Structure formats: structure tokens, C-alpha cells
Amino acid sequence: MKRRNFIKNASLTGVALAVGSALSSCAENTSKEKSSSTKTTNENIKVSLPLVIATWDVRQSTEKAWETLQQGNSVLDAVEQGCKVAEADKKNQSVGNGGRPDRDGNVTLDACIMDTHGNCGSVVYMQHITHAISVARKVMEDTPHVILAGKGAEKFAIEKGFQPEDLLTEASKKDWEAWKKTSNYQPIINIENHDTIGILAMDKNGDISGACTTSGLAYKMAGRVGDSPIIGSGLFVDNEIGAAVATGLGEEVLKTVGSFLIVELMRQGKSPQEACEEAIDRIVSKPNSNYKNFQIGYIALNKKGETGFYSIHDGFTMAKFQDGTNENLKSDYYMKQSS
Ligand code: ASP
């Protein structure tokens, strides 16, 4: 059987298996449709709104985003505020303050944000500023540019009132010093090494925004930038269609412009789940793909408020706040189907 057909069948099997399972976004959405009591101005939307989803178990972030919406703030505020919780958490060693450094010992942050009008802002390789996502928003709102990098991004942030800080915590410094003994650069499959926070939210009117923030892969080369701050790769939002965000080995997401691909697949009629599965399929189907040794996870949301998520390996999860319930859902994954 050709791989593409196999994936299609596998995904159908996955959906069938998921009936009755709280882990299936399809099944879950169906049940939410029935229980939804929220009225929305968009009659295509049958799910309860607002709705927040995020990569990995970042339920404090989804809760913050949800609360931000409940307080009447914009959906852009919600995704920014959600990201800020993770950025400020020094125990989170993959995002913001406390992130693991590059191989020279510098913590360098990447982040991007997109609003409901298709505007976007991004910072890459920025040091010394905890809230990279807020700087990305300022780039979007206060400059004629989309991306600011390195020293320029830091200078801009300080001009805007952000306080420079040392982002390298004792814990991350210790890990880096231990790593230097072997200097073996081997991206680890799951959250030990990557847990970029990507948040997508839909407000009660059905409008969507997204944000993504990370310290990138631990012990990357100095100057390395991954997918997370690159619009279309790490994040893409089209308020007419939906949105997607990525986590995992950024180099592989960049090569397939993963988030844009997912939104375009949804535009062609695929569900968020099908679109995430096809985007993973593009990566694993490449000749000589080394996919057994790296993780990629995608989450997506369409204009009807349906959600999907999929990864290459076991271990990926999606946090979802809807109907007053904050859940961490385990993702279906490619290796399960192929083993
Ligand atoms: N995608 C991020 C990067 O490649 C890593 C991650 O998801 O943790 O920088």
C-alpha cells in the first residue's frame, strides 16, 4: 500500500478508534456541539465559544488566555497573555526566562504573533527580554516591519520599556555545563528538549488569533533560528479559514512551511485533524526522512471551531480550554500507525 493511502486509512482507523474516547478531537467536538449553549454571531459555528488550544500541557497558559477573553479583552490579548505565563515561568526550560541556552550559553528567544486581520510580528534570536511575545506584538503594531532580529530586536524592546534581564537560570546553566562535557547535539523527542508554546484562540464572535514563543532547541548553534518565529512555518492564522501552530524540530517544519500548509489544506476542505495528519505525512514521506529520530506536533483550529492535533511520536499533547473545562489531551501519532 502506498504510504499516502496508508496514512489515509490509518487516520480513518484513528477516527474510528477515537469514537467514545475523550482523546479524540473529532469525538470531543461532536459532544461539545451537543452541549454547547453559547450563542455566537457566526451561524456556522456550532461549538461552545470562546475556545483556546495550545501545544503541550500548558494549562496555566490556556486558563490565562480564557480568562483574558472572559474579561472582555481581544483574542489577540488572550494569546499574548497565555504565552506570557509560560515565558515568565523560570521552571519552563524551553520558553522565555529560564530557557535552555544555545551551545555558547546564551538564551536566545524566538516568538511571533498574528491577529485576526492577518497582521503579524516576530522577533528572532533576541536576548535578555523575558516577554518575547509582547515584543513581537509591538513589532506588529508599532513598526513598519514584520521581523526584528538579535540586537535590533533587543534595542527596540528596551526603547519600548521592556527591562533587560539575565535569562540564564542556575538550573539551565547547570544543564548546559553538563551538556558541554559531551557536546553531543541530539534533539530529544519530547518535552525534555522542546515545548514551544503555541496558542490559538477563537473569541465568542468566531475571530481567531495565534501566538508562538520559544527559546528554541537547547544547545543549538549560535545564531540558529527555528520555525517558531517564522510566519507560515511555526504559526499561521487566516481568520477566514483557521489557524495552525507547530512544535518540534523546527528545521523540518521550515522545510514544509507546516502551519501555512495546514491552513491551506483546511481551505481545500480538510478538517483540522486531516490537515495536521497530512502535514505530518509530508515530513515522514520525504525520501530519506529521519523522522524516527525527531518529533513534530501540530495543532489546528478551523472557522467552525473544530480542532485537530497530530504528531510523529507518542508524547505530544494539546491543552484545550472550552466550555469552562481545561484539559490536556493526548495526541494520536504517526508511529502508532506505522509500527
Ligand atoms: N520548534 C522549536 C524550534 O525548532 C522547538 C520546540 O518546539 O521546542 O526552535
Image (cartoon, rainbow, N blue to C red):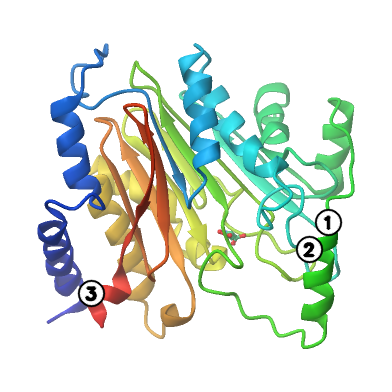
Q: In this view, does 5 lie to the left or right of 226?
A: left
Q: Is mark 1 on a helix, strand or loop?
A: loop
> Residue at point 41% right, 86% down?
288
Residue topped by disc 1: 169
x and y percent of residue 186 in the render? 62, 80
Q: What is the three-letter code of the residue carrying label 1?
A: Thr
Of all residues shown, which one is farthest toward the bottom? 182
Does residue 238 appear in this view? yes
SS class, disc 3 = helix
The mark total stands at 3
Please provide percent x and percent y for residue 90: 74, 49
34 is higher (above) or lower (below) than 54: above
Pointer 2 residue: 172
Of tags 3 and 1, the one toward the viewer is 1
Q: Residue 20 vs residue 149: left or right? A: left
Q: Distance between the residues labelled 3 and 2?
A: 36 Å
Which residue occupies 77% across, 88% down? 182
For residue 94, above or below residue 5: above
How far is mark 1 from mark 2, CA to CA? 5 Å
- Which label's residue is closer to the chain start, 3 or 2? 2
Residue 42, placed above or below residue 325 = above
